[in-house]
Amino acid sequence: MSSFVVIGGGIAGLSFGLALRKEGHDVMICERSRPEHPPGHAFLIQPQAGEALKRSIGEAGMAELHGSAIERLTISDHLGTSLQEVPLDGWICVKRSEPLRLL
């Protein structure tokens, strides 16, 4: 067994860390944000990615994500003027801190 340190708790860092852990390695994920001050950013997870995530963390893990269904994404400019709305069928939104907490 090897030990790994993954810098960054984004989608790539979490996915890589999870894959290494499943192979039996010791993994530490280092994230700049502190748990007591979770960032406001969120992950939008499309249906196919949600299915892949469910295979990794199981049905119980998915239930613990505390995600919300997202029906559309509004793209706005720096003044808040809506530029475009994109329908998102079957997408969920989770706080960035949720996958970090689970993993």
Image (cartoon, grey):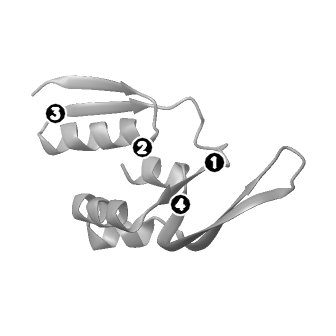
From mark 1 to mark 4, how far is it between C-alphas?
9 Å
Q: Secondary structure at mark 3?
A: loop
Q: Earlier in the sequence, mark 4 or mark 2?
A: 2
Q: Earlier in the sequence, mark 1 or mark 4?
A: 1
Task: Look at 36% across and 64% down and name the residue there.
Answer: 50
SS type, badge 4: strand
* Marks 2 and 3, how far apart at CA: 19 Å
Report the residue marked by disc 1: 41
The amino acid type of the residue labelled 4 equals: Val
Q: How far apart, in angstroms, are the residues tagged by discs 3 and 1?
A: 29 Å
State the residue at coordinates (39%, 54%).
102
Q: Is residue 58 left or right of residue 43?
A: left
Label 2 or label 3, whichever comes before in sequence order: 2
Q: Is residue 41 above or below residue 65?
A: above
Dot 4 crowding, Cα within 10 Å, few <14, some 14–19, many 20+: some
Q: In front of the other: label 3 or label 1?
A: 1
Query: Which residue: 27% across, 44% down?
Result: 18
**Direction from residue 45 to residue 18 in the image, left or right:** left
Quadrant of the image occupied by residue 73: bottom right
Q: Earlier in the sequence, mark 4 or mark 3?
A: 3
Residue 80 horizontal/vertical position (percent) = 86, 53
The number of numbered badges drawn on the structure is: 4
Q: Provide the residue designation for mark 2.
A: 11
Residue under numbered circle 4: 94
Q: Amino acid at mark 1?
A: His
Mark sitting earlier along the chain (1/2): 2
User: Which mark's residue is nearer the viewer, 2 or 3?
Assistant: 2
The amino acid beneath tag 3 is His
